[in-house]
Image: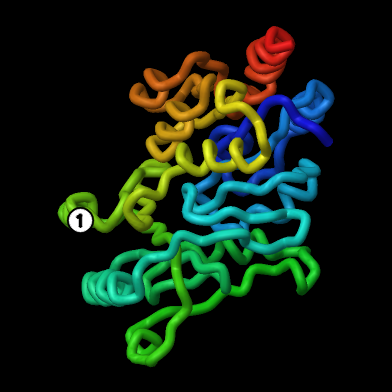
Amino acid sequence: MKYNSLLATDMDYTLLMPGRDVSPGNIEAVRALRANGVAFTLATGRSSYLVGKYAQDLEIDIPIITGNGGALYDPVTKRDLMSKDFAEEKFRALMTSMLERKIDATIYSVSGIYFSPYSTRRAFCDNYNAGLPDEDKIPLLGLDGDDLAKEQIPAFNKFLLIKPPADFVEELASDPDLTVVSSAPEFYDVMAAGVSKGDALLELADHLGIPRKNTFASGDSENDITLLESASYGIAMADSDAKVISAAAFVTSACEEDGFARAVFDYVIPKVKSFT
């Protein structure tokens, strides 16, 4: 299908509440976008392995931005098109430090989702896998000091840290080789320097041949600020952080009130109609 515009949305607390399905109202809004020539995709901090069933339910037919821009996933072929990985030496040093400090870390790779011995995220991923056919289930693997001692390890593109010490977050944020953003209260995402949802949005628009001036994005958290700033039309949820709201051109209602659908019908589609 030929699209004239692009809308990329964050998932958790924007399109859906964590652990829940997309609401019927938001699904209807996605269908309305396509009917009006708007390409729809996700721009999420989640791993590529945590978007597949949503892509199927929403009938997404273009690449999905995952890992906060660290990877681009094709839901049609079920393959990652690219992954902006940490340099191996950097990753080993970071992981060693996290193991020494007993950090709750979940680590994303195109080969699966890995957990430090202190991760509390396993249940969330087990819940995602529940009921899926074996071929669609996430490979869930441990990662500890013995694994780091091996000569070869997988490539990784993101750490998800839960409730890390403030001084450790500050240490990471001051590292010029890293990008550190908050994706939810007490959740911190760590990627290679230069990785962002915003850059990925513009790269995707160029890939699809959609003018950058016809791009929309919606989000609610700090890791969505670059997404809203890069889009020509940024949309913030009503309960977003003040910095997110200041980056938006339109503020909709909260996620639990189908704020995404409201933004689509009250703001996005009228804007798109004005383009023609």
Residue 137's spot in the image, x, y percent? 70, 69
Q: Is residue 120 left or right of residue 269?
A: left
Count of picture labels: 1
Q: Residue at x 54, y 35 (%)?
A: 13
The image quadrant of residue 144 is: bottom left
Residues 244 and 74: in front is: 74
Give the amino acid at mark 1: Asp
Res. 102 in view: no
Q: Residue at x 41, y 67 (%)?
A: 119
User: Between residues 209 and 200, which one lies in front from this camera angle?
Assistant: 209
The quarter of the picture where the C terminus appears is top right
Q: Is residue 256 left or right of residue 108?
A: right
**Would you say residue 75 is visible in this rendering?**
yes
Residue 41: percent from the left, percent from the top? 66, 39
How far across and how far down the image is residue 271, in percent?
66, 11
Describe the element under mark 1 as helix, strand or loop: loop
Looking at the image, residue 78 sits to the left or right of residue 159; the answer is: right
| Residue at the disc numbered 1 | 175
In this orientation, which residue lies closer to the viewer: 96 or 227?
227
Quarter location, residue 129: bottom right
Split into 4 quadrants, where in the image is the N terminus? top right
Q: Quadrant of residue 39?
A: top right
